[in-house]
Image: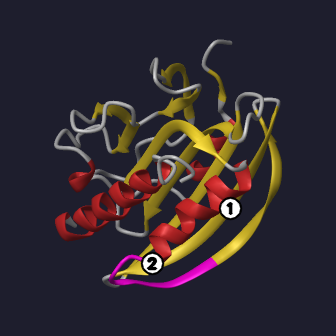
Amino acid sequence: MRLTNHRLAVIGGVACSAMLFTSTATGAQAALSSSLAGDSQLSGSAVAISVAIPAGWHQLVDQDHPQLLQMVYPETCLQGPQCASGVARLVSGQAPSAQAAASGAEQKIASLSGVQGVSVTSEGPTQIAGHSGYQLHFVYTYANTTFQAATAAIETGPASGTVPTSLIFVAVSDSAGAPPASVVDQIISSAQLANQ
């Protein structure tokens, strides 16, 4: 399980590097509930959106990338994404469009060494937190572990060359004790503007 968790950390870390918007445009039991806790929010001053923290998940601070917000599953994972079977990350930045941000993060993951079988299962425009957005669901395999993942980008402000955009990345592995894949959509659908 530790090797699987390390794989999730590597993939999640790269996805979040892509979430920095390519900058200028650029052991737990399954019995733990995956329903949204409702009272806790993954939020921070550097990110324009927040999402609910589901039961069994908890927020971890990334000292190297304080502009990234992250939460992991299970609650017993205290060492960062390397012990997680589920990860969600948020970041805000500038992008040409929500579609470019969501697609760019997925393409970055697909280009990683060792990532195989990337298959987009659905994608398209959406409304997230009352704003225009773009959501992309995909599946991939890394070292014989399958991941269900999604990127969702939300345009959070008016365009002026580029668009202020916030990106949500969520991935769960198929390892024993991992949260159900349905939590991916639960987290994304809980998004709201941070100032609301």
Compared with 195, 173 (above or below) is below
Q: Secondary structure at mark 1?
A: strand
Dot 2 crowding, Cα within 10 Å, few <14, some 14–19, many 20+: few
Q: Residue furthest top?
A: 196
Q: Quadrant of the C terminus?
A: top right
Q: Are marks 2 and 1 in contact (CB under 8 Å)?
A: no
Q: In the image, is 81 to the left or to the right of 189?
A: left
Q: In the image, is 28 to the left or to the right of 51?
A: left
Find residue 56 and report its horizontal and vertical position in percent: 39, 37
Q: Residue at x 22, y 67 (%)?
A: 1
Residue that badge 2 annotates:
111
Q: Is residue 24 visible?
A: yes
Q: Nearer the viewer, residue 191 or 156?
A: 156
Q: Residue at x 51, y 23 (%)?
A: 41
Splitting the image into 4 quarters, where does residue 162 fall? top right
Q: Nearer the viewer, residue 18 or 186?
A: 18
Splitting the image into 4 quarters, where does residue 61 fall? top left
Q: Is residue 182 visible?
A: no
Between the residue at mark 2 and the residue at mark 1, the CA separation in whole angstroms equals: 16 Å
Residue that badge 1 annotates:
136
Compared with 122, 43 (above or below) is above
Q: Secondary structure at mark 2?
A: loop
Q: Is residue 107 magenta?
A: no
Compared with 21, 4 (above or below) is below
Find residue 144 and report its horizontal and vertical position in percent: 34, 84
Start-end of magenta stretch: 111-119
Dot 1 crowding, Cα within 10 Å, few <14, some 14–19, many 20+: many
